[in-house]
Amino acid sequence: MTRNRQIGILTSNLPAWLRSGFVCLCLLPLLLTALPARASDQITAANDVITSMISEVETYLETDSGNIEKRTKNITKLLDKHFDLLAIARFSAGPYWRAANEQERIDYVQTMRDVVIGTVVRNFDQLSGLRFTTIDSQAKGDKMVLVRGLFNDSTGKRPPVSVGWRVITPAMAPAKVLDVEIENISMLVTQKQENVTIIRQNEGRFSALVETMRKRQQAP
Amino acid sequence: MFALSKRSLNHILVAPFTAILLLAACSSVPETKRSDARDPYEGSNRKAFAFNMGLDTHVLEPAASGYRNVMPLAGRRAIDNHIDWTGLPATTFNSTLQGRFENAGLSTVHFIVNSLTLGLVDLTEDPKAVKSQDFGQTLASFDVPEGNYLMVPVLGPNTSRSLTGRVVDSVTNPMSFLKAGDALQTMQTLRPPVAAVSTRANLFEAFNDVKYNSLDPYARTRSLYYQGRAGRINATVGKPTNNRTTDDLFESFLEDPK
């Protein structure tokens, strides 16, 4: 209190611009220390999501008996918990998300979720024997972190695969995975470019994308 | 020993003309109707893609499946090593053109050391030390524009720049001038199809996923090609491509909350 009064006395005779400059100068060290702290929090949150997700996948693999129903249940739980499905849907629909109406958006998110779950369930066996090691984590702006690592095959039959997880790290919400990069190829960017091609070939009709996805799902 | 063989001469003469004819045969799609701005020849590219997929279904996929089942892991590794070894002269040539003399020196040393085993066994300490370079990357390092997307029958996805690079690499590779004994000549002739089968076998599941499970295998292949090529050019030449990087795409997405 006394200290504040002393600062007040010291600055009261100064012109307004100089007073605000003085305040900025006082706050600058605080800002400079806060920025790396935010980046470090972001990185910790992103690393925690990946560690937790990998640990859950390992548990599921250990107990996996090949029962598709149980596998689907586990994958659905994992996906809903760790992935930002709405952001994935929004990104993968590209500029056509804005043009889509509410029902089309709901249909797309639901169909996309089913397709992703189906793909992971179908290929779940391939994850067996792989061990993930984090190499580094890098903040990409203040809303995203790229966690890079290697999947090594414990049997040595497959070469190591470089994988990057793009994790959204909002300040007031839990961190969630947005994208997976395999050997520097973004799965989400690939999906977006494929989706945009389909919509453009159908004269910008967003519903054509959902129809194509459903047809693919029903194909043997 | 280094005299031009008749077959090599034929390759040299035919390859550029084939590329030019292919380019001339393509009919351009107006920019507003393109599914991707980089792909003005989508119509003819899709036809070439359908041809390549047919070739894959009837030749490459069964061959790769058999190769995976029959060839032991050590044999597959030896073949991959040999294919990498035959690409080293091109890396030396292109690294020199780009002024990357350390990489040029390393690839020369690796080529000489491994020539004792015809490249089948890698005798060097760190095979990953050499960064593979092709003439397409050299052109990128000289800021030559990427050009249009081209799906070439048999050869697969390319850009005009990378296709030019492939032609130049095939012409300048000293291995193609080599006039050696019958055994070596047979190896030379067999190398491209064996490399195709080996690559297909190494990417068996991933390739089949694109081929059988994609919504649009053509569009997916194009995206994978561009991203893979951009990653390779960024990593080895150190220059971002003309396309927006993945980081940029995500950054602008997160800037827009709607």
Image: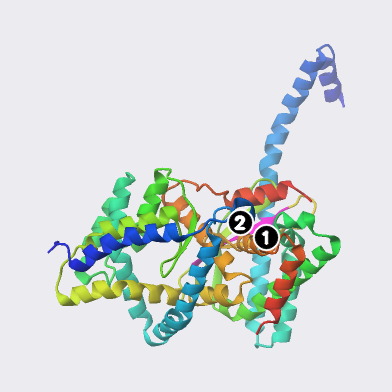
Residue A161 shown left or right of residue A56 in the figure: left
Can you tell which mark lies on residue A213? Answer: none
Q: Give the residue pinned by disc 1.
A: A200
Give the residue displayed 83% in from the left and 24% down from the top. Answer: A3
Q: Nearer the viewer, residue A108 or B84?
A: A108
Q: Is residue B75 above or below residue A199?
A: below
**Left or right position of A87 against B16:** right
- Disc 2 + disc 1, Cβ < 8 Å: yes
**Residue B138 at what x, y percent from top left?**
37, 49
Q: What element carries label 2?
A: loop
**Dot 2 corresponds to which residue?**
B34
Instruction: Give the residue type at disc 2.
Output: Arg
Residue A85, image quadrant: bottom right
Which region of the structure is painted magenta?
A161-169
Q: Is residue A63 magenta?
A: no
Residue pictured at 72% horizontal, 59% vertical = A204
Residue at 80% x, 69% y is A107
Chain identifier of the residue bearing label 2 in the image: B
Against A124, is B170 above or below? Answer: above
User: How many residues crowd mark 2 within 10 Å: few (<14), some (14–19), many (20+)?
Assistant: some
Give the position of the N terminus of chain A as an image quadrant. top right
**Amino acid at the residue labelled 1:** Arg
Across and down, in percent, residue A29 comes to: 69, 32
- Chain letter for mark 1: A
Please state the horizontal and vertical placement of residue B153, each as a whole percent of the image.
Answer: 43, 68
Q: Quadrant of residue A102?
A: bottom right
Separation of residues labelled 2 and 1 (CA atoms): 8 Å
In the rendered image, the vertical position of residue A219 relative to residue A197, given as above or below: below
Q: Tell me: residue A206, above or below residue A57.
A: above
Direction from residue B46 to residue B162 in the image, left or right: left
Q: Do labels 2 and 1 share a chain?
A: no
